[in-house]
Amino acid sequence: MFSLLKEGASVGDFSTRSSANLLTHLNIGDEFLLVSPEDWNDSQDYQEGKRRVENIRVVNDTAERGVKLVEDFNKSLTNDEEEKQFLLAYRSLNQIEKLFPLQLQRSLSSLL
């Protein structure tokens, strides 16, 4: 099997001060780093750290704030569901008109 690792590479070649800070912040012992990665599963520090990391809830704060901002804006316009649907349809029609002005004009004129 082809390996990108140079012979004699160690875990230290792939970690930084940030790696150590993360372990400290999560209260994960770093003793397992002193042994070969093949032996990490035998380490209590590694097993506890693995359990903690697997239980971390990952959140995309930026996306969640964006969704909240749009929801709040929509609520500020109206609370009436029918009006919200009208505004959404109107906005969609405006976007279509900007993207396909000639096609929309032809379609509307054929209806008249």
Image: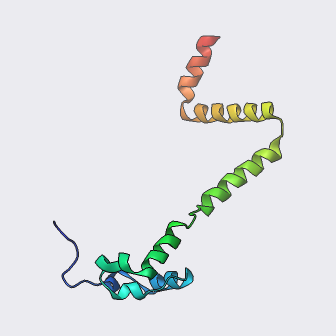
In the image, is residue 95 above or below residue 9? Answer: above
Q: Is 85 on the left or on the right of 109, as rendered?
A: right
Q: Position of residue 64 (x, y in %)?
A: 64, 57
In the image, is residue 12 above or below residue 103? Answer: below
Q: Quadrant of the C terminus?
A: top right
User: In the image shown, does 55 or 14 lie closer to the viewer?
Assistant: 55
Q: Is 9 on the left or on the right of 92, as rendered?
A: left
Q: Picture quarter containing residue 105?
A: top right
Q: Residue furthest left?
A: 1
In the image, is residue 1 above or below residue 86? Answer: below
Residue at 58% of width from left, 24% of height from top? 104
User: In the image shown, does 88 or 11 lie closer to the viewer?
Assistant: 11
Residue at 25% of width from left, 83% of height from top? 9
Q: Is 27 on the left or on the right of 45, as rendered?
A: right
Q: Position of residue 79 (x, y in %)?
A: 83, 40
* Circle count: 0
Residue at 56% of width from left, 19% of height from top? 106
Q: Is 88 on the left or on the right of 48, as rendered?
A: right
Q: Position of residue 1 (x, y in %)?
A: 16, 65
